[in-house]
Image (cartoon, rainbow, N blue to C red):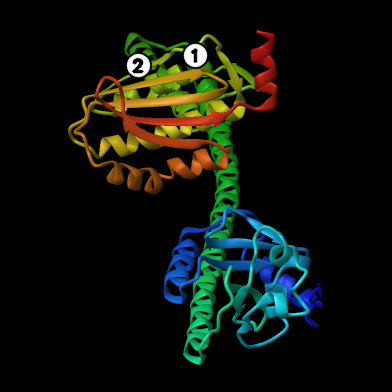
């Protein structure tokens, strides 16, 4: 048996081959179908679409064998890679390269072989399409040409596969970039909100509080003045309460460890009157602590989704549930009309609910609840610290 030499461009050939992600066991349906067509057209019991890596030949499409591949050293196809044309072995027992090959001298009893190289668009031979038979036979000129044409079709299939891989990679890169950009945007937005809330509380609220103190210690000269001062005090108290409420709405005062269910409850209660539908919130879990990041993310997601529901005129009731089952789970049910899930998914993306959850490493699910209501479920990972806290609890 004479093993084939390595092609002169072996290193570059293997590099090109790696871009197709084919160096693994297992066939693919389009190549299996092509193998079946080859076997019928050339009247051979075995037909293969193969890929040859550094030391092994993989069968990516096959008919007539249960093997997934074999050693490159024993492969007929490794000889095909050394030429540009179809390689035909009419009787392997009479060919010095193959007469003592285990596939010829052993139980497989191979006699006939024909293979055409699969050439990439870069000009590298990646593998072959090939035929085997246990009986010696010849291959006419027209059949040789046909086998070469079949190999060109495999090249086109591989290029489509490669393009799909590149498109998928590009899509993942875009998603990653989008997430990074959005995460930075969210961080800047939270910083801006924190500054606004601080200014509302420290500058405006404290200024009004000081004015209140002055009015309260002032001594009105008559009953009419006293009445005006009292009225001014009440109005300033109301303004102060509204500013503090607005400050909390913009940036909830969250410490590193908080009772998140209570925080969310307070937030929802502070904004509920701004919506025409009834909003309820509950915690169905046993644990009542979560991270600062979980709390803020939950509040912002609820805030965004309520704005979406506001546009749906048929919503009368919204129920928010938070729970902890290895993840921080926010479930928002509404009794609005049963809209197409595709439209709802569009709303998720347009309302940046998905981006907010994805930036935190979470997922978003849309479905119909057991009670027949529309359900948005957001699953967020608990931070390491939060997880430890839950375990200790």
In the image, 92 versus 324, the foreground residue is 92
Could you say where residue 181 lies in the image, as x and y percent from the top left? 58, 53
Q: Secondary structure at mark 1?
A: loop
State the image quarter where residue 112 is shown.
bottom right
Please tell me whether mark 2 sits on a helix, a strand or a loop.
Answer: helix
Q: Where, by quadrant of the figure, is residue 373 drawn?
A: top left
Classify residue 45 as left or right of residue 374: right
Q: Are marks 2 and 1 in contact (CB under 8 Å)?
A: no
Q: Residue at x 66, y 78 (%)?
A: 125
Visible residue check, residue 177: yes
Q: Is residue 19 visible?
A: no
Give neighbour class at mark 2: few <14, some 14-19, many 20+ (Cα, 10 Å): few
155 with respect to 235 (left or right): right
Q: How far is mark 2 from mark 1, CA to CA?
A: 14 Å
Image mark count: 2
For residue 35, above or below residue 325: below
Q: Look at 33% across and 44% down and name the residue there.
A: 347
User: Could you tell me residue 47's position as x and y percent?
Assistant: 53, 67
Q: Which residue is mark 2?
A: 231
Residue lying at 59% horizontally and 78% vertically, measured from the top left: 114
Q: In front here: 266 or 137?
A: 137
Nearer to us of marks 2 and 1 is 2
| Quadrant in the picture for the N terminus | bottom right
Residue that numbered label 1 is attached to? 218
């Amino acid at each position: 048996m004479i093993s084939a030499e390595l092609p002169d461009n072996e290193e570059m050939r293997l590099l090109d081959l790696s871009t197709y992600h084919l160096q693994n066991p297992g066939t693919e349906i389009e190549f299996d179908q092509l193998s079946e067509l080859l076997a019928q057209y050339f009247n051979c019991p075995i037909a293969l679409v193969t890929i040859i890596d550094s030391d092994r030949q993989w069968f990516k499409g096959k008919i007539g064998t249960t093997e997934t591949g074999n050693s490159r050293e024993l492969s007929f196809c490794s000889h095909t890679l050394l030429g540009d044309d179809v390689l035909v072995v009419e009787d392997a027992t009479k060919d010095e390269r193959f007469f003592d090959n285990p596939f010829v001298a052993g139980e497989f009893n191979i006699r006939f072989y024909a293979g055409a190289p699969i050439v990439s668009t870069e000009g590298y031979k990646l593998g072959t399409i090939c035929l085997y038979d246990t009986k010696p036979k010849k291959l006419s000129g027209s059949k040789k040409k046909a086998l070469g044409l079949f190999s060109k079709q495999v090249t086109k299939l591989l290029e489509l596969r490669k393009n799909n891989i590149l498109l998928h990679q590009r899509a993942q890169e875009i998603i990653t970039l989008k997430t990074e950009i959005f995460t930075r945007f969210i961080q800047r937005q939270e910083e801006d909100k924190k500054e606004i809330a601080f200014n509302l509380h420290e500058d405006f609220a404290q200024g009004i509080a000081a004015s209140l103190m002055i009015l309260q210690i002032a001594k009105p000269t008559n009953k009419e003045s006293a009445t005006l001062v009292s009225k001014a005090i009440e109005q300033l108290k109301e303004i102060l309460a509204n500013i503090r409420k607005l400050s909390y709405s913009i940036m909830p005062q969250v410490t590193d460890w908080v009772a998140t269910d209570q925080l969310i409850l307070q937030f929802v209660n502070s904004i509920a009157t701004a919506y025409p539908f009834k909003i309820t919130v509950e915690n169905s879990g046993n644990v009542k602590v979560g991270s600062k990041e979980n709390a803020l993310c939950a509040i912002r997601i609820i805030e965004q989704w309520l704005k979406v529901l506001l546009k749906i005129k048929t919503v009368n009731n919204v129920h928010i549930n938070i729970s902890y089952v290895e993840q921080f789970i926010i479930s928002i049910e509404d009794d609005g009309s049963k809209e197409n899930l595709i439209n709802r998914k569009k709303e998720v993306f347009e309302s940046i609910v998905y981006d907010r959850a994805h930036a935190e490493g979470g997922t978003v699910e849309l479905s119909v609840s057991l009670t027949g209501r529309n359900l948005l479920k957001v699953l967020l990972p608990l931070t390491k610290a939060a997880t430890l806290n839950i375990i200790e609890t």
